[in-house]
Amino acid sequence: MKELRDNIAAGKIKSTAATETVFESIKKYEPIVGAYISTFEKSALDKAAEIDTKIASGKKVGALAGVPVAIKDNMCTTFGTTTCASKILENFHSPYNAAVVEKLLAADAVIVGKANMDEFAMGSSTETSALKKTVNPWDTSRVPGGSSGGSAVAVTAEMCFAALGSDTGGSIRLPASFCGVVGLKPTYGRVSRYGLVAYGSSLDQIGPITRTVTDCALMMNVIAGYDPADSTSVDEKIAPVPDYLEKLDEPPGKLKIAVAPRLNAGADKDVQNALADALNVYKKLGAEIIEIDMPHLDYAIAAYYIIATAEASSNLARYDGVHYGHRTANPADYIEVYTKSRAEGFGKEVKRRIMLGTYALSSGYYDAYYLKALKVRNLIRGDFVNAFEKCDCIMMPVAPTTAFKIGEKIDDPLTMYLSDIYTIAVNLAGVPAISIPCGFDRNNLPIGLQIIMPAFSEDKLLRIAKMYESQTDWHKRKSPIISV
Amino acid sequence: MDKKIDRTEVIKVAKLARLQLTDAEIEEFTGQLSAILGYVAKMNELDTADVQPLAHCLPISNVLREDIIKESLGTEKTLANAPQRDGNFFKVPKILEESNG
Amino acid sequence: MSNLDYKILIGLEIHVQLCTKSKMFCGCALSFGEAPNSRVCPVCMGMPGVLPVMNKQAYEYAVLTALALNCKIAEFTKWDRKSYYYPDLPKNYQISQYDLPLGSNGFIEIPLESGETKKIRIRRTHLEEDAGKNLHSAGNFSQVDLNRAGTPLLEIVTEPDMNSAAEVRQLAEELQRIVRYLGVSEADMQKGHMRFEPNVNLIITRGGSEFKTPIAEIKNLNSFRALEKSIDYEIHRQLDEFLETGKTMEMGNKTTRGWDDVKEETVLQREKEEAHDYRYFPDPDLVPVEIKEDRLREIAACLCELPLKKQMRYITEYKLTAYDAGVLTAERSTAEFFEQAVAAGGEPKRICNLLAQTGLKLANEKGCTVCELGVTPQNLAELTKMASDGEISASAAATIFEKMAQTAQQPRIIAKELNLIQKSDAGELEAIVAQVVTDNPKAVADAREGGKKCEKAKNFLLGQVMQKTKGRANPKVVSDILALKLS
């Protein structure tokens, strides 16, 4: 993508041409993979033409000028709809743009469309979307991962050059890993959440999904930074935003990489082998591998499914059919406006999580569940703090398996939740983590390597990722559906 | 402990969450929520008596903004997504009782 | 029922709307009477994806008020979500404070009719956002206006230390005075800037045993009058109910009753307080506020002398009546004007009278404060000095004051212009008195005689002198001369 950006800026390639190519891909591949809930062909081409003219006349343009990008459909846009893949917001037109969307627009990006996702970001496979079915381009009988499945597929299937996703328990990293692309969850507070439809407020972060680490760094340059409209966004005096591209190709010196063998043992053989191979690459580059344990990570899923659902039950209370969104046709009274609109508008998984969260916060259960989970969270964060005293970064799988079959886990919530076992603790601790392609399994399905770093060290994280990427070419492989 | 949550509690929670559930859904959720809560009970293996709850992972405080007026959306934009409106008001079926707050 | 006695217990929950420029969590302007849904933005209407940012001024006004109420200020305070569903609450949760209110364990002193004061303990003060408004006018539907949603409210909860409706009213009025003095709220009852919810119950002693009636919370009170009347009504209703049913206070049998201003009675709204499960938890979108000693001191420096203290001081220091002291301290601007005039050397009682009678009357007519009339405290002081020295009469002073408000001129100049400088020269007056005495022998005779006709005659003679001097004679001096001449 960066290459494209540079070429467009230099006038070597026209944005219009790139955008047309993207829409040709969409015509070809969308019927197969279904990544987008909505696309904006006309306005995208108009914007592309506008950018080309600007560049031709020597005017200054933004960092993403003319680059076609996709946005997960839980980020508010004044153009098109913002549905969160839910019936309850199917026709919602936001009157404002999310902060990151404003940044993309200011960077002169060309917005291709809004990408499919699990409903309200609740899911690990994009199967809970109420509006669209998305499949994995590497094997169309399998899930793309979730909840940012649409974004990952759009990137893999060349239907955009980069995408934004959101990650609450692994929702960027998991689909990135299942689709063989790069996905970064920044430190909590690094990117503004203003305009990101809230799921788990203390866990949510927006991040880039791209084909290469370089592209990821470029996206971070555009979206990172303090936003006064978000009280949880970090002041740049405390955590300045570096230029993520600046030293990207410089390996960060002698690395100490921590691995947690006890945890890794729970992953599939092929995944474990890919991880071992990746570590060997780092060893050849001079890194030292040390073994650690992170004893409280076993409780991360339990803590997450109380904290995230508690926050979600409150965040989703506003969808009530009164001020916006779906309203039931014939309510008997004003209470039924709520109970029926929500029953009709929300899918099963969303209802389940709202129920769970409501229960965890309810009178008599708050201490046993919610308060307990917040304490466990503190212990989990402690595991990361301890680990980082001994190492530069932690490496582990992104998921215990590669992409599973559609329908395989959807009927058993708990089984589905356990897919997040390697990603979820990272959100509880608020630290940054990336998924980069590191191999394929026996079924030619992508495997992702997860690298986790201390808070606000995304620049070093990207350099460590780049180190590996420059020694391998997993990221260059194309999925079977891509016709040459 | 068999059922972590029973049918009566599920109905109570659904009411708190303003969700109208069918009998089938109540049945299904009772089973699934029980299983999930059973898993979540794992946390009790940890002794957290001396541990502080971590509500915010960032050590920030005192984020306050100056008392400056910003332009409002305007009535049309405010009501643009309203499922039902009455002139410049949002419209709902008659509310008979006083606020619950 | 000679062996029956009862004690009344009343606690009050007050919501004060703070007069910040913008709402608590967004930049929308505060409004009253604006076109519906015209002061709303994505944040205060709870659109998907929005986030709240705390208003600094609202926080500081809240701390200032809590300090004035002698509360302990929490060094560390946080925001909690209070969940319930209602059409005027767009997020279906209210951002409030639960277990760490920003102020606690304070007290407010209220004046009693006896002239003494009473301390009412304040349990807690905390900040929260207001909801919008539901209107139930036309047909079988209700209308929702979100203009008010997100307005900053300070909630104050007292202990049940009040024992009569009159005391509650005193507290309400005193609180209104305090928040206006501090400049944190306009506290206009008509505009809903202050809302009161009393909690009432009785402790009845009968035949040596004590019985507590169930607590009733009263809502829908729109005036001080309604506040007082509803409590008086409720006290009698509870007594009657006890005598009839013997019902006493139990866990969870607190009721909510609405005041009907037309029928003048409280009506049951909710039987068993269906314990609302508000599911409080810390708001993950907002970070805590920590206040350090030095910042607290800075805010405390903005405290002024509180109205009741000032009122008491005027009585003891300036020997003003309780009534007059009350009039002067009703508004901070009046009191400060008074104090400035006193500091400029004026005579306190005279300043008080002029302000209370003339000054405030003019201010009311013009719809402004006494400070805005165009009269300086220095000029007022000068005016009262002239009156004290006998240069002008009291009524002349009032006239001059009015003129000062119109022209902003010096009192002495106005007095000269209007010919109001009294003749106090005894010599000059003596001649005139002598003339009047000579001209009115019958009146003189009557005055000398004493009895019923004496006063009337004296006043007549005095009136004659006043006529001859065109009202400019100093009446006291004339009376003295006359008395001498008559004896």
Image: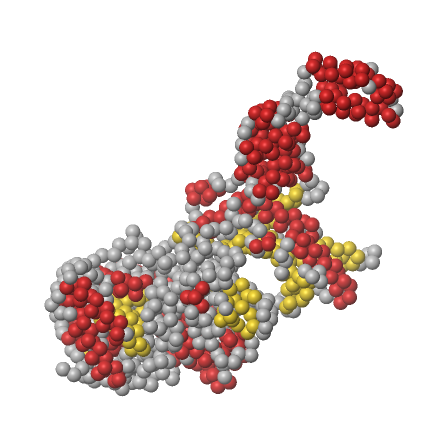
Rendering coords of residue A465 (x, y %): 19, 67
Front in this rendered view, residue B73 or A417: B73
Front in this rendered view, residue C156 or C44: C44
Write the residue at 72% across / 58% down. C233
Looking at the image, residue C237 sits to the left or right of residue C82; the answer is right
Looking at the image, residue A27 sits to the left or right of residue C36; the answer is left
In the image, residue A453 sits, relative to residue C175, either above or below, namely below
In the image, residue C306 sits, relative to residue C441, either above or below, namely below
Task: Look at the image and tell me whether residue C40 can be seen.
Answer: yes
Rendering coords of residue A182 (x, y %): 22, 71
Task: Look at the image and tell me whether residue A274 can be seen.
Answer: no
Rendering coords of residue C271 (x, y %): 65, 69
Q: How many marks?
A: 0
Write the residue at 23% across / 79% down. A26
Looking at the image, residue A53 sits to the left or right of residue B84; the answer is left
Q: Quadrant of residue A214?
A: bottom left
Q: Quadrant of the C terminus of chain C?
A: top right
Rendering coords of residue A24 (x, y %): 20, 79
Write the residue at 43% across / 66% down. B76
